[in-house]
Image (cartoon, rainbow, N blue to C red):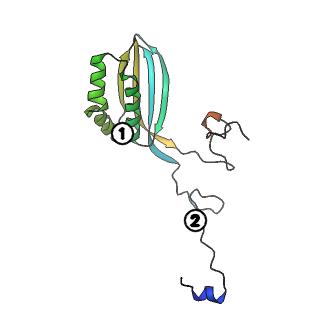
Amino acid sequence: MTTSAADAAGTPPPPPTPPPRTRGGRSGEPHRTPLVRPGVWCEAVSAAEDSPETAERRDAYAAGDAEAAVRWMRAGVRSVASGLGPLQAGYVLDHWVHGPGSLEDYARLNQGRPCALTVYRDGRRLTWRARPVRLVRLVAVNGRPPCTDACPSAAPAGRRGRR
């Protein structure tokens, strides 16, 4: 073990330098974390085949990139594939989930274009769609995560409903 001359003389080591601030604040430093970032908005929508006005959102996801969006769409399609007819299930799984269809949609999203996949089951049309968007980053206020009070369901587990 080595000691420096300052340690041998009994002088305390210099205080550690604080980490750089990332959000700006009272010190007037600029924001280093962008407040708006690119992302992909994904939705799963269900509607009666003969009545598109009955469409209702079944699920939604804000993906960070095209890869995450396509992965989310694949998971949703896989979950209903077993209930599709054999021809449709074979096409969806072989062409879109495990084949070139999802790669084409990945490329579309990276080019800034939307994509969608629709399947038909029991008289309903199920559509997974994704489109590039700009996501606004939410920040903590008074040490609380964003949306804790306004959206209790968005609070981390174990913190819901607590003040």
Horizontal side of 40 relative to 9 (left or right) equals: left
Quarter residue 155 falls in:
top right
Determine crowd level at label 1: few under 14, some 14-19, many 20+ residues with C-alpha closer than 10 A. Answer: few
Q: Is residue 151 something that shows in the picture?
A: no
> In the picture shown, does residue 10 fall above or below 87?
below
In the rendered image, the residue lying farthest to the right is 163
x and y percentages locating residue 50 in the rendered image: 40, 10
In front of the other: 106 or 31: 106
Q: Which residue is mark 2?
A: 19
The answer to whether mark 2 and mark 1 are in CB contact below 8 A is: no
Q: Is residue 162 something that shows in the picture?
A: yes
Horizontal side of 36 relative to 123 (left or right) equals: right
The amino acid pointed to by label 1 is Gly
Horizontal side of 5 relative to 142 (left or right) equals: left
Q: CA distance from mark 2 to mark 1?
A: 36 Å
Identify the secondary structure beneath mark 2. Answer: loop
Horizontal side of 63 relative to 103 (left or right) equals: right
Q: Earlier in the sequence, mark 2 or mark 1?
A: 2
Q: Which mark is residue 112?
A: 1
Q: Residue at x 45, y 19 (%)?
A: 46
